[in-house]
Amino acid sequence: MPRWDDDPDDDWDDDEPVDEGDDGLAPCPYCGREILEDSERCPRCGSYISREDAPYERKPWWIIVGVIACLYAVYRWTF
């Protein structure tokens, strides 16, 4: 029969750190939900985790039109 020690002052297991385990989860930087560390996108918010993983985004049309207009103005001013 096992012998139980009911001494309340004995806190031998409080001194050891608790190993929570490495489950490979990390928080999403945008929504905070736990996702796998190797994920490219968050399944909840759909954001890409890093800029390298994000697809190429086209520049807005008004920037392209503005650059062309400026180049045309410089061209007309010089000639």
Image (spheres, rainbow, N blue to C red):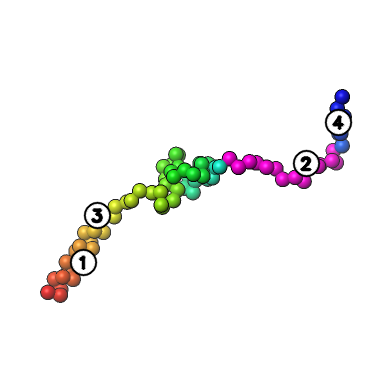
Q: CA distance from mark 3 to mark 4?
A: 76 Å
Q: Does dot 1 land on a helix, a strand or a loop?
A: helix
Q: Along the line of sight, which residue is nearer the eye, 3 or 27?
A: 3
- Tags 3 and 1 touching, CB below 8 Å: no
Which of labels 1 and 2 is toward the front? 2
Residue at left 68%, top 42%?
A: 19
Q: Earlier in the sequence, mark 3 or mark 2?
A: 2
Q: Which mark is residue 70?
A: 1
Disc 3 marks which amino acid? Trp
Quarter of the rendering occupied by the N terminus = top right
Is 27 placed above or below 75 here? Answer: above
Q: Along the line of sight, which residue is nearer the eye, 44 or 20?
A: 20
Disc 4 marks which amino acid? Trp
Residue 46 placement (x, y as % from top left): 41, 42
Q: Residue furthest left?
A: 79
The residue tagged 2 is 13
Whether residue 76 is visible, yes or no, is yes
Q: CA distance from mark 1 to mark 2?
A: 72 Å
| Segment tinted magenta in the rendering | 8-23
The residue tagged 3 is 61
Quarter of the rendering occupied by the C terminus = bottom left
> Is 19 left, or right, of 49 in this rendering?
right
Residue 43 placement (x, y as % from top left): 44, 39
Q: Which mark is residue 4?
A: 4
Q: Earlier in the sequence, mark 2 or mark 4?
A: 4
Q: Earlier in the sequence, mark 3 or mark 1?
A: 3
